[in-house]
Structures are given as structure tokens and as C-alpha cells.
Amino acid sequence: MAAYESLVLGATGAVGSQVVSQLVQSPLCTRVFALTRRQLSASEKADKFGSEAANSPKLDVKVVDFDALKQQDFNVGRDGKTPEAVFCCLGTTRGDAGSDEAFIKVDHDYVVSSAKCAKDGGSTYFGLVTSAGASKNSFFLYPRTKGLVEEAVKGNGFERLSIFRPGLLNRAESSRKWEWVANCIMAGVDTKTVAAAMIRDFEARDGKQREFSDAQIRELGK
């Protein structure tokens, strides 16, 4: 199987940090570009990605302004193009964002802008994490925003597009309080499993547009 370069959006989040760590460990992935909103210290990189990944020459953390993304932010791979594989794990919650508008900006606007830059830069694969229950017709803000962003990203015409819709996430020590309580009642899907599913899907190089349910993510990522 051919070697490849990758780019990760939302690289410091619960799923994104696991994607970065596992990509560094993949013998097929030669470079991992992690786009972040601010510079990370050595200790922060080790905390997010693990010491081995943080110190790997394969990892390149790049600071970008998500409010003003430029094509050059993405054209960091070979021949000045966007890496072949782009993994988008951008996301927050209404509570963490502080307002409906701030939530939509991260979970919709940043993702839509990123997808366009990735496609225009020559990326052939876009892996997107949304959520179980995503629907553009939902009455509720969270699933409606996820559904709308799925619809928008599909319009880019990627050669391969995979959408991952996990249910409750198990973030281990980083779980939000309500997630910790929910995980005591019903086991959520581990963020490591979601990351593994995304990478295995890309490396299988199978299919054009695929959508993975929570159950399918668990099966592929186990």
C-alpha cells in the first residue's frame, strides 16, 4: 500500500489528538500536519499526543487562524499541495462555545471553510466526525448543525468522503461531567476507537462516499 501524508483539523480535541497519535504510529503515514489555533508547548504536545508522537519528526504542528483560513495553510504537503488524507475532528458544544453563534462558527463554518481549502489544495480524502442523530431537519441546534455541515461538505465532490457519526464519546479523564455520568449508565465509544476507525477507513482505500454509524465505528476501530 502506498505511503501518504495527512493533515488533522481539531488536532487538540478528544478525537483529533488520538488521530494525530495513531497517524504518527502508522508505518504508512510519512507526515502528520496538525493545524491548531495556538502554539503548543513541548509539555502540551506530550499531554495531547503522547511523548512518542510529540517528539516524532513525522509530526508538524502549524498554527492557523480558523477565522481567516488561507489556501497556503493547507498546501503544506509534497509539491506544495494539501496532503492526500485530511481528517476533520473540529467540534465543540453549545455550552463550551458560550452561544449558538459561536457553536455554529466552529462546528459548521470552520469545517466548511476547511473542506473547501482541502479540496482546492488537491486532497482526495476527507474524513469528517459529526454525531449520531445528525440531521439538517432536526429541531435541535446540535444535530441540525451536524446535518447541515455534512450536506455542505458533500457538495465539495471529494474523490473519497467518509462521515463518522459516533454516539456518546468516552473521553476517559477528559470527559465532560455529563458525559462521565452518562458513561456510568451506558458505555460510550472510546475516542481511540473512533480515531482507529477513521485511519483504517482511509488506509483501506475503499469506496467513494461512506457513512459510519456508532456500531460500525466500534466494529471498524476495535
Image (cartoon, grey):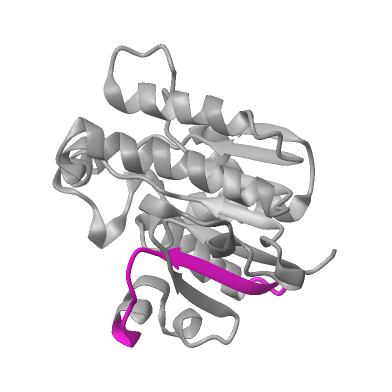
Q: Is residue 8 above or below residue 120?
A: below
Task: Judge left or right: residue 199 versus residue 4.
Answer: left
Q: 143 or 7: which is nearer to us? A: 7
**Image position, residue 214 (x, y; %):** 49, 34
Task: Judge left or right: residue 153 versus residue 139.
Answer: right
Among the 4 quarters of the image, the one containing residue 132:
top left
Q: Looking at the image, which residue is at 45% across and 82% down?
A: 54
Task: Judge left or right: residue 177 versus residue 26.
Answer: left
Residue 28 visible (yes or no): no
Residue 29 visible (yes or no): yes
Quadrant assignment for the N terminus:
bottom right
Q: 169 or 155: which is nearer to us? A: 155
Q: Looking at the image, which residue is at 33% across and 77% down?
A: 40
**Image position, residue 78 (x, y; %):** 74, 71
Q: 101 or 26: which is nearer to us? A: 101
Bounds of the magenta span?
26-43
| 213 is within the stretch colored magenta | no
Among the 4 quarters of the image, the one containing residue 65:
bottom left
The total number of labels drawn is 0
Q: Looking at the image, which residue is at 24% across and 33% down?
A: 101
Q: Looking at the image, which residue is at 19% across and 49% down?
A: 176
Q: Is residue 210 above or below residue 45?
A: above
Among the 4 quarters of the image, the one containing residue 144:
top left
**Image position, residue 95 (x, y; %):** 16, 39
Task: Judge left or right: residue 47 versus residue 128.
Answer: left
| 31 is within the stretch colored magenta | yes
**Image position, residue 187 (x, y; %):** 33, 41
